[in-house]
Image (cartoon, grey):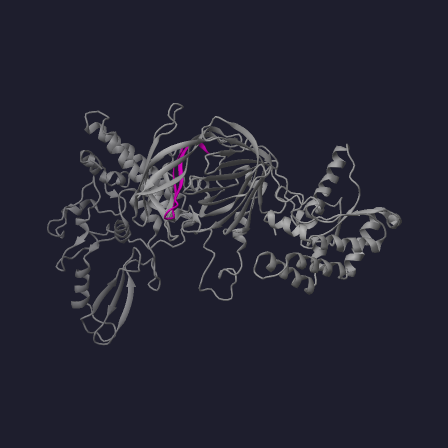
Amino acid sequence: MPRASTKVFKKRRRVFNKGRCKKSNDGCVEGISTVPKNCAEEKNFADGAKPCTNETEPSASERKILNMDISYSDEAFSGFRNVIVDINLLACVFFEAVKCLNCEKTGLRLHLNESNCGEAVKFHLKCPSCKYNYTFLNSKKCDSSENYELNTRLVYAMRCIGKGAESARMFCGIMNLPPPPTKFSKYNKILPQATRETCEDSMAEAVREAVDENDGKKDIAVAVDEFIYWMKWIVSYAAIRLNKRFGCRRFELYDVTAKNDPYKSGLLIPEEEKRLESPFPDLHLLEAVDEVYFFGVNSKSECVLVRVARIYNKMADAWIYLKLANGKTYNLTETIGYQESSDGNTFSCGKLQMHYILPMRRWRIFYCGMLKETSENKENEESVFVKFVFLWKASSKAYDCTLDTNPTGFASALAKADWKGSFKPPVDKFITSSNFYAQTGIIAGTVSINDGEDYEMYLFGEKVRNLAKMTDVTECKCITILGSTPTIGHNFHLSTMSMKNTFEDLQIGFVVDPDGEMEYLKKMNVDLKPSSTENPRRPFKANFSTVLGEYYEMSGNVIEPIILNIGYGVKGFFEVSMVEFTVRDKKGIGIIFSGEIYDVPKPNFTPVPTPSLPQNVPLTVKFTDDISYFGEISGGKGSSLGKLTRLSKEEKTFIVPKGIIVTTSAYKEFLTPEILDSVKNLENIAYGKENGNLKEACNEISNIVEKAQLPNQICQSIIKDLSDIFGDDAKQHKFAVRSSATGEDTAAMSAAGQMDTFLGVQGILEIFTSVKKCWASQFGYIAVEYKSIVQVF
C-alpha cells in the first residue's frame, strides 16, 4: 500500500472495539471486565499504572502484576475477572513461596508448553525433591488431557481485520477462553457473515476517513483499490486452500507400490478413466459441454484439427481442418450432424468418428466424406472426397486444471474480478467453468484425396477434453495458444481467460519438455494485435513462466486464419489461426484461439434415458426387440435392420421383412480352442510376426469354422425365435442368411461384398449350416485383405 494512505488506516486500529462497553447505573464501565468506581482512590496500583475512569474500561497496564511486592484486596478489586501475570513472575512464586503437597518442600518448578494447547496454555508443575508432577491449564474450561488445534476460522477472522494467528492466540489467552472445538461447522455461517460485515464497514469507513484526510478529494482511489484487492486475494487464497476439492485430482489413480490391486498397479484400466473418456449422459448437456478435440502439427507446417461437441437431441457440432505440405487445406462445410454413439465410447458427427481404444492412452480418429479443398493461393475451391484414419497416442500425463496447480495465480485472478457486492469468492464457479483436462501426444495416420494414394502424416500435438459448465457463462474472453517445436519436442498449452463476476486474467496451462515432464503455468503475458482484413498476418508475443521457475519468451506471427464456427447457438465471435513462432531459438508452429462469448443459451429439452447394454445378452434377438439396436450385440447390418423396423412402424411408409439376429454372444459361445488358435495364427501372419502364406491360413480357419459343431443352445434359440415369428410355417419359408459383423455397414467399413450371403435357405438344418458359413466367410482372403486396407483387422 502507498505511504500516503498509511496513517489513514492506522487510525482505524480501535474501530473494532466500538460498542463493546456500556455504562451501568452506578457509572461503572461494564464490558469484558469491570472495575469499581472508586478504584482510582486505591493505593495498591502498580507503579506507573493508570486508574480507570467512567469513560473507559481498564487498560492492559492496569491489570498487570509487575512484582511480588504488590497485594490486592478482594473487596476493592472484585470487579476484575482476570489479571495479567508475567509467566516468569508466576514461576518465581511457585519456586519461592509454594510448598509441595507431597513432601512440603519449596522449590517447585513451573514449565509451560505452547506447542499443542491451542489458545490456552498448559502448565507442568514438578517437584525436584519427590518427583511430584501435576499438569493444569490456565483456563478451567479446558481439559488438560486434550490437545487442541488452532481454530482456522478464528485465524481467518483475525486476518480479515488485519491480525495474524498470534493475535488470535493472545486474544483467547487474555480473555480466558477455552480452545474452540475442532468441529465448528455450526459456526461457519455466523462467523463469516460477521467477518464480512465488519470488513465491509471498516473498509467503507476507512475510505471516508481517507477522503476527509485528503481535503475531500477522491484522488486516492489507487491506494484503496489496492487494499481491497489484497483483502480479496487473502480471502480467495484461503478459500482455495480450504476448498474440499483442493488437491483432488481425477487421475491420481495409480500407485506403483500397491500390491494385489490390478487397478492401482496399472494392469487394468480404472473405470473412472473410461467414464471420463466416454460421452456423458444427455443430462450433463443441460448445463455443461461435452466435447473432445485433437490438434497436431509438424515441421512441414502440416496441421490437423478435429473436434466433436455433442449437442442435445442426438446432434453434434464438428470441426475438421486439415493442411498438407503442398499448402492445400481441407475444411468441413456441414458442421452440424447426427451422432452415433451406441457403443458407448464414440464421439461422432456425421461421417466423423472418434473413440478411445485405451482410455487416456490411444484414440482412433476416422473420417470418410466430402470436404472443401482450398488451394495454397486461396484462388481455387472445390469439394473433394477425403478419407483419413489417425491414431493418437499419449506422450505425457494428463493436465487437470485443479486448484492446487497454481493457487496463488488463481487467487489473483479471483481477486481482480467484481464479486457483485459479495465477500465470498466464486471458487465453485471457477472450478465448474474450467473443468477440462489435456494430454500431449503423437498423431499418426494416412490421408487419401479422391481415392488417391494414401499420404502418411506424423504430427505432434495434444488432446483436450472439455466438460465445463457453460450455462452461467456471460462476457467471457479467452486467448489460447497450442503449439509445438517439433525439432526438440517442446509442447505448449497457454491460455488466459476472463469471465464477468468470476475471474479476470486467469492464466492456466502447461509446458511439456522434451523428456515428457509437465510443468504447470504460473504467469503469462500475451500481446496479440487485433485482426484486420487488410493485414491478417500480424505479430504476437507471449512471455510466461512455470511453477518450477523456467522462463520462456515466445514471439511469432499469425500466418493463416482458419474459418470455424464458435458453437451451436453461442453468441459471440471466435477466431482461429495458424501461427509460427520462436522459443529459445527453436522454431515452432501451432494454433491460436481468440474470441469472446456474450451468452450461452440454456438448452431446452427433456433428456432421454440412454439405453444400456443388458448384463445377459441372449443368443438370438428379433428385429422388433429394442436390444437389437446395439451394434455390439447385433453387428452393423443387424442393428440397422432393428432401427429400420422401428421407423417403419412409426412412419408406415415402407416395410421391413421379419427376421432374427444371431448375436455376438452366440458367436462367442460357438468359438472353440481350435478356432481361437487358428485365429491367433492368422493374426501373426497378417501382422508379419510369423512367416506363412496368408491365403492358406485364411482357407484353413474357414474350413475349421464350417466343420465345427453348432452348440445345441444356439440351435434351440434359433428354432424358438423363428417359431415365435412364423409359427409352424417356419420350415416352409425361404430365408436369406447374411453377415452382420460389428463395424460392418459403417463409415469406417462398409464391407460391401466382402462376406458371403446365402439366399433361398429352407429348412432348419440348412439354416444352421448357413450360419456357420457366414461366420467362416469373415476369414476369407478377400475379407482379411479388405480389413487390413481399412486398418480394422
- Place of residue 372 in the rendered image (x, y in percent of width and height, measured from the top left): 54, 31
Residue lying at the far top of the rendered structure: 534
Q: Judge from the rendering whether residue 683 lies leftward or rightward of residue 198; answer left or right.
A: right
Q: In the image, is residue 555 above or below residue 140? A: above
Q: Which of 338 and 303 is in front in this view?
A: 303
Q: Which residue is drawn at 73% across and 42% down?
A: 641
- Place of residue 526 in the rendered image (x, y in percent of width and height, measured from the top left): 33, 36
Q: Which of 420 and 477 is in front in this view?
A: 477
* Residue 747 seen anywhere in this rendered image of the structure: yes
Asked whether residue 480 is drawn in magenta, I would say yes
Asked whether residue 678 is drawn in magenta, I would say no
Q: Judge from the rendering whether residue 177 lies leftward or rightward of residue 39; answer left or right.
A: right
Q: Judge from the rendering whether residue 50 lies leftward or rightward of residue 318; answer left or right.
A: left
Residue lying at the far left of the rendered structure: 47
Q: Which of 385 and 211 is in front in this view?
A: 385
Q: In the image, is residue 539 above or below residue 389? A: above
Residue bounds of the magenta highlight: 473-499
Question: Count the marks: how many?
Answer: 0
The image quarter in which residue 22 lies: top left
Residue lying at the far front of the rendered structure: 693
Type of secondary structure dominating the magenta stretch: strand
* Residue 502 seen anywhere in this rendered image of the structure: no
- Place of residue 55 in the rendered image (x, y in percent of width and height, measured from the top left): 20, 39
Q: Which of 498 and 112 is in front in this view?
A: 498
- Place of residue 711 in the rendered image (x, y in percent of width and height, measured from the top left): 76, 61
The image quarter in which residue 697 lies: bottom right
Viewport quadrant of the N terminus: top left
Q: Judge from the rendering whether residue 736 lies leftward or rightward of residue 445; answer left or right.
A: right
